[in-house]
Amino acid sequence: MPERSDTGSTTVPDQPAAGSTPPPEGEQHLSRQLSNRHIQLIAIGGAIGTGLFMGSGKTISLAGPSVIFVYMIIGVMLFFVMRAMGELLLSNLRYKSFADFAADLLGPWAGFFTGWTYWFCWIVTGIADVIAISGYVSYWWHDLPLWIPALAAVILLIALNLPTVKAFGETEFWFALIKIVAIVALIVVGLVMVFGHFQAPGGAAASFSNLWNDGGFFPTGPMGFVAGFQIATFAFVGIELVGTTAAEAENPERNLPKAINSIPVRVMLFYVVALIVIISVTPWREISADRSPFVVMFTLAGLGFAASVINFVVLTSAASSANSGIYSTSRMVYGLAREGDAPARFGRLTSRKVPANALLLSGVFLLAGVVMVAMDNSIIEAFTLVTTVSAVLFIFVWSIILISYLVYRKRRPHLHEASKFKMPGGTVMCYVVLAFFAFLIWALTQEPDTLRALLVTPVWFAILGIAWAGLRRRPRHVAREAAFRSELDGAQQD
């Protein structure tokens, strides 16, 4: 049974999955301090990423109004990934994250590859967020060297995550709340402009007809529509973030399903409705690829002060995303260290049950974003490069979740039957979504900038393969593999 800490919060014993080595007696464990409101807002914060604010301008310039369908399709597909993840996490509350059930169902190698790839996903995403933060700050201070706000952001994020997990939850709660209020305000103001027949200084009139009166919904053709998936995919990275809170969430059986089931509503409101309003107020051809359309909408409408407010909001959004990245990577490295897949020092907790060493490791790597903006002042080019790499790696993680689900259905049908949170569509939808991911990878080959990033990505898996080849020979990993094989053989005999 979970233990109670002196503060009254529940601690979670690090009970490993099959084939793992149990932790020594008396060790500290992560603490369940994230309440329902924390989990809900963390999930919303993960769903509303920097890609929506920073990258949707380029997406609109590539796909035109058809970008609305792009976000809808991606949102629907990822909902099924989240439902698969939810059923798996709730099938065994010893799982701390999806890396745990990947190792349990696919083998120790899967936990190693998934854990470290997810860590790298968020490091790359965090770098993109640091780059974005620099761009947003330059909106007010044009002459300020971009590396200064980038460095300040990294230091601040580390400081916010060091105290307790509850401190992270509170920070993310308010970051996410700012995003929600801003998007709802944007939608309301945009609708007032449309119904009030607002006319921008440039002559463009706000009207829903802007969605179709300039080339229709697909003005850039089929390939323009396909190109829209490249950057839009990055807008959804972090949607699985709620899966890394499983070991620190109060009452996960109730709170995780609530957070996951609200994903369709979030996608419709925060992505689809917001983009409909933006394109209705500002014709899609007037939206710049290298600026946030949220800022551009108010700027073109002549509301300079409102544009500054929105710029502040998208700045906090980037900070929110980076904050989530710092949190999730530190917990993932902590879990890897507990399984022997990372140096043991990263598996240590402070007296407040925070994996500080793992946290500092992630912070150090985020400094790469500082270096990138110091060497190259082209914000959007750097952003496109790192977001494409991130999107490809997240697709790998999402695919591992689905493949784990397929194995779970085959090897543990009794758990599926007993589940109160079954994935709709089951195995059929798994194959549909995996086919969609194959389409996304193909889409990334269609533009030179995203193709370059795609070709670089296999280097990461080569590095992991070399590391695993050496690690798997260690006695602890040999024992884990033997235990996994033994359980697999037993399941096949049954």
Image (cartoon, helix red, strand yellow):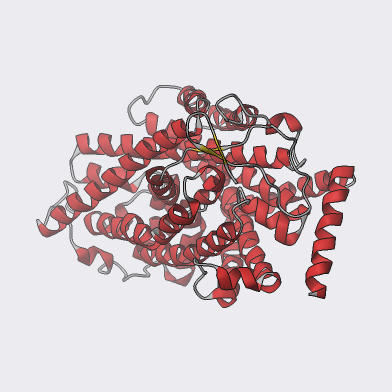
Q: What percent of the width, then of the height, locates residue 468?
A: 82, 47
Residue at left offset 41%, top offset 61%: 261
Q: Is residue 81 left or right of residue 411?
A: left
Q: Closest to the observer: 80 or 409? A: 409
Classify 354 as above or below 396. Answer: above
**Which quadrant of the structure image shows residue 447?**
bottom right
For the residue pair 75 and 138, the one nearer the viewer reads as: 75
Query: To which quarter of the image does residue 272 belong?
Result: bottom left
- Counting the numbered discs, the total is 0
Q: Residue at x 83, y 56 (%)?
A: 483
Asked whether, in this view, residue 122 is left or right of residue 55, the answer is right
Out of 387 and 26, give the one closest to the viewer.
Answer: 26
Q: Is residue 378 visible?
A: no
Q: Is residue 28 above or below residue 39?
A: above
**Where does residue 148 sit, x and y in percent of width and height?**
48, 22
Vertically, is 144 above or below 103? above
> Which residue is rendered at x = 37% and y = 42% of the image?
176
Quarter of the image containing the C terminus? bottom right
Tell me where residue 302 appears, x and y as whole percent. Answer: 18, 41
Q: Quadrant of residue 124?
A: top right
Q: Position of residue 59 (x, y in %)?
A: 42, 56
Name the residue at 84% across, 62% down: 486
Residue 284 falls left or right of residue 332: left
- Is there any visible trace of residue 95 in the rendered image? yes
